[in-house]
Amino acid sequence: MKDTVSHQAIEYLNYLKEQGISHVPRTVKRQAPPPRPQPASRSTAAQSPPHTPGQMPPNGADALPKPALSIPAALQPIANEIAACHRCPLAATRTYTVPGQGPLQPDILFVGEGPGADEDAQGIAFIGRAGKLLTKMITAMGYTREEVFLGNIVKCRPPGNRAPTREEMADCIPYLKQQIAIIQPKTIICMGATAARGLVQETLPIGKARGHWREFEGIPVMLTFHPAYLLRDPRKKKDCWADLKAVLTRLDKAPPK
Ligand code: URA
């Protein structure tokens, strides 16, 4: 057990070194924060599994995304900052931070709400059930997952799949704004009310706002449903597809036959 832990520690330190982090304070002794009351959860989705003591990394300043996640070099400093972020209470309960992934200058940046249990466990955006549906939507549009950027309003999982609070969003959105300035997507698709409210201050409910164009820093923003909502109400997929086709038209593209 001791060997496994020190092996993990060495692996993790090597990973930090690759990320350009050459110093780790010697006296860091992580103390579990006192339990805080959590707002009511929106679903009964599984909570993250508890961490085995000594397993790397636990939540906290070392919640770097897994090395498997390839992030463009220009975005790595923001990913590092996110990994060390303690601006809001979500830092205390996250496993991995989820900075988002994809190429620079993509045709589309998809913006969701925040990581769910699967994303929290892996540090990768949209890999759970909603992510699988999103992948189908991306493919139907004629793209691969790797050709678009997948991001979120908040980068840490709100416990119990609750929506992020106004304060958590306000603390986290500067990261997304910095990312967008570097990513420079041609279009942005905000999926769900949280993304629409967070990025373009939408005040209409998403059922009314969807299908409408907004703008963020000169970039056209389409509002549509979140894939998790489409899983709950598949009848709304038709509307969402109309919104995605409007994005393709704006990009001078057509869905594949
Ligand atoms: N839902 C989101 O909004 N974002 C994810 O990354 C996964 C699920």
Image (cartoon, helix red, strand yellow):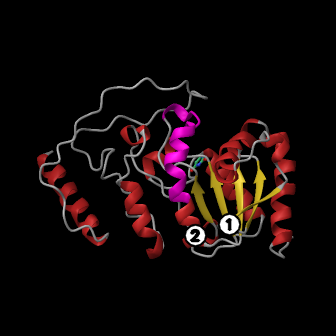
Image position of 194 (left or right of 167):
right
Which residue carries the number 2 mark?
A: 181
Drawn side of residue 46 relative to residue 197, left or right: left
Q: In the image, is residue 107 above or below residue 28?
A: below
Residue identified by numbered label 1: 217
* Horizontal and vertical percent position of residue 217: 68, 66
Nearer to us: label 2 or label 1: 1
Label number found at residue 200: none
Q: Quadrant of the N terminus?
A: top left
| Nearer to me, 84 or 238 | 84
Q: Which residues are magenta?
A: 159-176
| Disc with the residue nearer the chain's start (2 vs 1) | 2
Instruction: Kindly indicate the quadrant of the structure image that contains residue 246.
Output: bottom right
How many marks are shown on the rendered structure? 2
Q: Is residue 104 above or below residue 94?
A: below
Visible in this render: residue 66?
no
Distance in Å between CA atoms under marks 2 and 1: 9 Å
Relative image position of residue 215 (x, y in whole percent): 75, 62
Identify the residue at horizontal 23%, vertical 38% (top origin). Answer: 53
Q: Is residue 163 above or below residue 134?
A: above
Q: Residue at x 81, y 65 (%)?
A: 247
- Mark 2 touching mark 1, by CB under 8 A? yes
Q: Secondary structure at mark 2?
A: helix
